[in-house]
Image: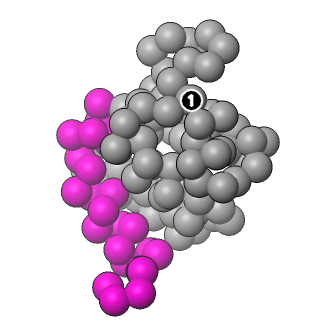
């Protein structure tokens, strides 16, 4: 599983446009659950941009939404990503280095 997760994260963070925004979303959801509107405000991104990235992350099972499509339902990291967050951090550091890393 870890090899497949690593490949998926490389694709979503480094191999496709918007990887930096997806990384920011995942890091923010690690702190606590947020709904799409809250994420848009917290990250200073357009709501539609956030929805696009959330849909992609849901489709790839990196996040979950236990309340389904209920209005304002929060998003959480999936159990798989939560248990393997170190892999995300490693890929993020290599694919999207921050100043000083």
The total of numbered circles placed on residues is 1
Q: Residues within 10 Å of mark 1 (few under 14, many from 20)?
A: some
Image coordinates of residue 82 in percent, x first then y, are: 27, 39
Taking the view exactly as shown, the residue that stands out farthest to the front is: 41
Left or right: where 100 falls relative to 19: left
Image coordinates of residue 63 in percent, x first then y, are: 45, 34
Left or right: where 62 falls relative to 81: right
Q: Is the magenta stretch mostly helix, strand or loop?
A: helix
Left or right: where 45 falls relative to 74: right
Q: Quick check: can you spot residue 64? A: yes
**Residue drawn at 33 percent across, 57 percent down:** 88
Q: Quadrant of residue 99?
A: bottom left
Vertically, is 82 above or below 99? above
Q: Which colour scheme is used?
A: one colour
Residue located beneath label 1 in the image: 35
Q: Does the magenta stretch include residue 30?
A: no
Locate the C terminus and report the quarter of the image it occupies. bottom left
Left or right: where 2 falls relative to 70: left
Q: Is residue 87 magenta?
A: yes
**Residue drawn at 21 percent across, 40 percent down:** 83
Taking the view exactly as shown, the residue that stands out farthest to the bottom is: 100
Vertically, is 79 above or below 48? above
**Residue drawn at 40 percent across, 53 percent down:** 27
Vertically, is 41 above or below 91? above
Vertically, is 27 above or below 1? below
Q: Quick check: can you spot residue 56? A: no
Q: Quadrant of residue 40?
A: top right
**Residue drawn at 48 percent across, 58 percent down:** 23
Span shown in magenta: 79-101
Locate the N terminus and report the quarter of the image it occupies. top left
């Amino acid at each position: 599983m870890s090899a497949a997760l690593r490949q998926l994260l490389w694709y979503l963070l480094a191999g496709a446009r918007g990887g930096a925004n997806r990384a920011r979303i995942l890091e923010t959801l690690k702190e606590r659950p947020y709904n799409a509107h809250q994420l848009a405000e917290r990250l200073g991104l357009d709501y539609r941009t956030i929805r696009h990235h959330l849909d992609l992350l849901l489709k790839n099972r990196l996040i979950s939404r236990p309340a389904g499509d209920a209005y304002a339902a929060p998003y959480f990291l999936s159990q798989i990503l939560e248990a393997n967050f170190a892999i995300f951090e490693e890929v993020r550091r290599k694919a999207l280095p921050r100043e000083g890393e």
